[in-house]
Amino acid sequence: MSPLVIDSLHVSVDDKEILKGLSLTVPTGEVHAIMGPNGSGKSTLAVTLMGHPKYRVTSGTAMFDDQDILKLSPDARSKLGLFLSFQYPQEVAGVSLGNFLRTALNVRRKEPMAVPEFYTLIQQKAEQMGMDEDFITRGINENFSGGEKKRAEILQMMILEPRMCILDETDSGLDIDALKIVADGVNSLRSPDRGFLVITHYQRLLNYIKPDVVHVLIDGKIVRTGGAEVAMELEVSGYETIPT
Amino acid sequence: MSSKVQMATKSLGTYQFGFSYPEISVQKAPRGLSADIVKAISQWKHEPGWMTEKRLQAYAVFKQKQMPPWGADLSQIDFDNIYYYLKPIEHQARSWNDVPDSMKKTFDRLGIPEAEKKFLAGVGAQYDSEVIYHSLIESLTKKGVIFTDMDTALREYPEIVKQYFGTLIPASDNKFAALNSATWSGGSFVYVPKGVHVDLPLQAYFRINAKNMGQFERTLIIAEEGSYVNYVEGCTAPVYASDSLHAAVVEIFVKKGARVRYTTIQNWSKDVYNLVTKRARVDEEGTMEWIDGNLGSRVTMKYPSVYLMGRKAHGEVLSIAFAGAGQYQDAGGKAIHNAPETSSIITSKSICKDGGRTSYRGLVHMAPAAKGSKSNVKCDALILDSASRSDTYPTMKIRAKDVTLGHEATVSKVGEEQLFYLMSRGLDEPTATGLIVSGFIEPIVKELPLEYAVELNKLIQLEMEGSVG
């Protein structure tokens, strides 16, 4: 299995450099956490890896499955096996979540999944995420609460079964019960064939999704890499004490 | 040739339903229009003298009338270069087996027989200028419902036709209504007796098939007291490089407590001028609903109207317009309130891309008699790129007291963030844009019969794929 390998990544948005030579490797089968203060470039990393057109890569590489993903469109990255759980999922009125997800699932299958089979699958996953069936027929994220949107992101991840999952501040806006459900959902997907990059500001989420490796991101660069204990240290002493 | 026209011609290559088969014709008038041709059309059809007279009067009006001063540029319509009458086969076909093969192929591609098998109450398909195939479920006939083409109606029910024809839209209304009144051929005639509910939609397909063939169908619907009917028509047309003209007239009479829904999905090929006058008169407590979808054509100018003439009459106009390269969709609605406590709702949604132009043009008129009436107008435009344009031209004339009016207009662009979100799940750009667009029109699509909803979504998807990527 090929890891996600990011090497000396420089990214600018509106001519302002946000990522300044970021390097890290996420092997499949591992959960890596990225922690960092506001403005350190966490979300920039997430959307750049997924191919947001506004984020301009000025130098560096990002490889997945031995392919240079930076050359691919967002849909091609998705089909390759990348997935981003958005910090702020978009609303699309009038397009049901079910219909959308079935389309998204079928573009990566040789034979489209039959409608009844798909609805059995999505109902089962929605139940696992503690979501009412009603969400399947509602517009994508349309009038969903913040917590409902985050659950819907994980639901999408369960259906699409990506091989590299990027979670951008999935814990923000969640109460403790919802956090547990979301974490259980993520944990149920942990497998030797799948890698995770969990981006978070707070250590709280990592109590439920145990990381194998923790990276600390400050001012566009990884300044420290270690085990789960790094998160604990940050929780106690904050980002200021990290030597840069 | 202007650059717009060139773009339109270029985009024709991708037009999906632009198939056509060789012309079959028995009678074909020469190009252009004259009093002699008008007379000849009437004679070929063995019409009564009063209709010939009406046609000639209308032709005189047509010659005098100026082109409409608003909306799209119509100066390229060459009235002298159009065939005004073409009769495809000698007699009206009785059954599907009698329909000539080339026509059958065309209809097969439109899926008419399948549609009929499913849930449609009747099919009247217009091929060129006359209806060639027609069927009607027996139970409707037993209830006294008449669903036929206008030419047959004129022969078999002359007294009803004479009573209503041209009374709501006289030839003097506008130049294209005059042209239609002079040259009309085909179209549907529907009569629903008092208290009869036609539960299944009545459906008809229209096509222009002869090169430069203007299509001037005439539709007349009369819904007697307390009756209900849902009339559905869908149009596609084959591709021709030269201009075609479609100038239809639709008159609808909604009597006391009756309800009529008239659904149109039009996908004319991109060289057609689609200039249609549609009007409904609604009596006390009656309801008229226009549902109007305009995808194709080079130019569409169409503003379905409701004349609310009795207390508590209600009218609705729902329209969707889509304009791609070289297209101008000028659509909207009119509500004329002429009685107390009447109400109207006009909802318009438009989408433009690749330099296409859409505009909403509407009128709400509250006459002095319209005390206690209300009207609500909502128009939303979705602009897919910076080359495209959308405008709103609402007019309100208020002559009554104690009335309520609402007007709301939004213009939005497909957001980069929305597109990125959908693409991040594996959807390519046209599919993602198509989904956003279908979500935008969903409030109107859900009002359509299922087949039309599916077809409309498919057409929108094809439009999206046409030029992206």
Image (cartoon, coloured by chain):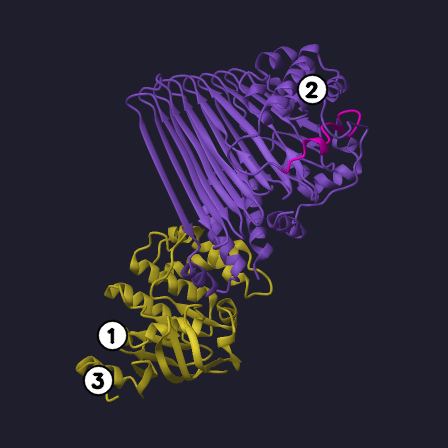
Magenta span contains residue B77? yes
Whole-angstrom CA distance, mark 3 to mark 1, is: 12 Å
SS at circle 1 = loop
Q: Look at the image and tell me whether residue B162 can be seen.
A: yes
Residue range corresponding to the magenta coloring: B76-92
What subunit carries mark 3?
A
Q: Which residue is mark 1?
A: A202
Judging from the image, what is the letter of the chain drawn in purple? B
SS at circle 2 = helix
Nearer to the camera, B202 or B459: B459
Residue type at the position of mark 2: Thr
Whole-angstrom CA distance, mark 2 to mark 1, is: 78 Å
Q: Look at the image and tell me whether residue A214 can be seen.
A: no
At x 50%, y 50%, the residue is B388
Q: Which residue is mark 3?
A: A233
| Residue B386: percent from left, percent from top | 47, 55
Residue type at the position of mark 3: Glu
| Residue A33: percent from left, percent from top | 33, 79
Q: Main secondary structure of the magenta part?
A: loop
